[in-house]
Amino acid sequence: MRDPAELLALLALPPTLLPAAQAAARVFPLRVPRSYIARMERGNPADPLLRQVLPLDLELHPDAEASQDPVGDLDAMVRPGLLHKYQGRALLVTTGACGVHCRYCFRRHFPYSAANPAADAWESALSYLRDDDTIHEVILSGGDPLTLHDRRLAQLAEQLAAIPHIKRLRLHTRQVVVLPQRVDEALLAWLAACPLQTVMVIHANHPRELDADVRYALAQLRAAGVSLLNQSVLLHGVNDALDTLAELSEALFEAGVLPYYLHQLDRVQGAGHFNVPDDQARTLLQGLRARLSGYLVPRLVREQPGAVSKTPIL
Ligand SMILES: *Cc1c(COP(=O)(O)O)cnc(C)c1O
Ligand code: SF4
């Protein structure tokens, strides 16, 4: 769904929200699958799933601490669309398209069309990966790599598997959560056949996102031999509560997914209202540690430009 008026009507929300939603959607359009909307509570403008996708006028307030490239992606771009920040792994921005537009997205302003690795059929990115034998893992990111056709993904996986020093293929995707129907026979077939070890990092922020269809999709991925991890973004008004985070970790593990990262928000222009102060974030983490098995506690991190890894917030 792309029309704010239709979204508000479907959820029985007050039409007074419409002018702001339309104004903010002109900067970063609304986009959300209907199966994700179906998990929202009707009549609740504070619904934690709705908050992640509904354009608000708060997005239009300039944020003095924010930038257009908060994590230094452009400095780390070694070939169009290929980011090499950390030792041993490199990240390929495969596409600008996503199945959902998350209002807090840190790549809201990424210059996707100027940094498109597909422009030369991936050749310059692939040649960089071939030439650097310290790279053992390639991360397909975006946008969302699962908006690409399986034929394209299978071909890319094959080209990567042909590079001797590459051992693992990792996909960073929110499609499994927002559009679980994307996990279909074609996707499962190439993943199961991939000679590389496959890892998928999904992106769930709230336990209510993991409905029966998502759990089914995750079970299928596991059966295809994919290791499943989750990363969340800590978001004010969505998941900045101990019970919510604890339930999320429990629900993820029940679905065969290990909590991996809990990201502090990247200060991108237009998302300041989602920010949670570091002190509160630390307190939430301590609460989780006191309540959950160690492997259910995600690593609280921030991405700092120029750092050798994600930076833990201790
Ligand atoms: C986050 C990120 C990675 C992955 O880091 P891990 O700590 O291995 O999950 C790799 N490359 C880039 C450019 C990144 O932003
Ligand atoms: S799915 Fe990821 S890349 Fe796409 S809008 Fe959401 S946070 Fe951004």
Image (cartoon, rainbow, N blue to C red):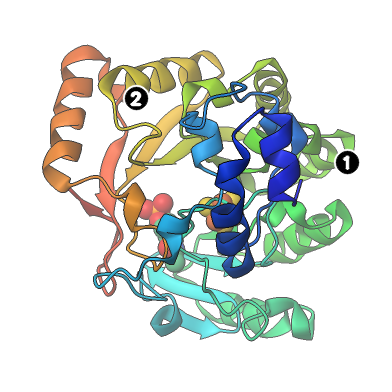
What is the tally of numbered marks visible in this picture? 2
Residue at the location (44% across, 28% down)?
A: 258
Q: Look at mark 2 in the image and give the residue it sits on.
A: 245
Q: Where is residue 74 drawn, in percent x and y?
A: 44, 82
Q: Is residue 134 visible?
A: yes
The reply to whether callout 1 and callout 2 are in contact (CB within 8 Å) is no
Q: Is mark 2 within 8 Å of ligand 2?
A: no
Q: Is residue 170 visible?
A: no
Q: Amino acid at mark 2?
A: Leu
Of 53 and 112, which appears nearest the observer? 53
Looking at the rendering, the quadrant in which ligand 2 lies is: bottom right
Extreme residue in the front direction: 16
Checking the image for residue 186, the label placed there is 1
Q: Where is residue 308 drawn, in percent x and y?
A: 27, 66
Q: Where is residue 302 drawn, in percent x and y?
A: 27, 55
Q: Is mark 1 within 8 Å of ligand 2?
A: no
Residue at the location (27% across, 75% down)?
A: 306
Q: Amino acid at mark 1?
A: Ala
Left or right of 272? Residue 251 is right
Residue at the location (48% across, 81% down)?
A: 77
Residue 184 to residue 111: above or below: above
Quick one: label 1 or label 2, which is nearer the N terminus? 1
Q: Where is residue 159 drawn, in percent x and y?
A: 75, 66
Instruction: Kindly report the distance in space between the C-alpha atoms of the residues bearing marks 1 and 2.
Output: 33 Å
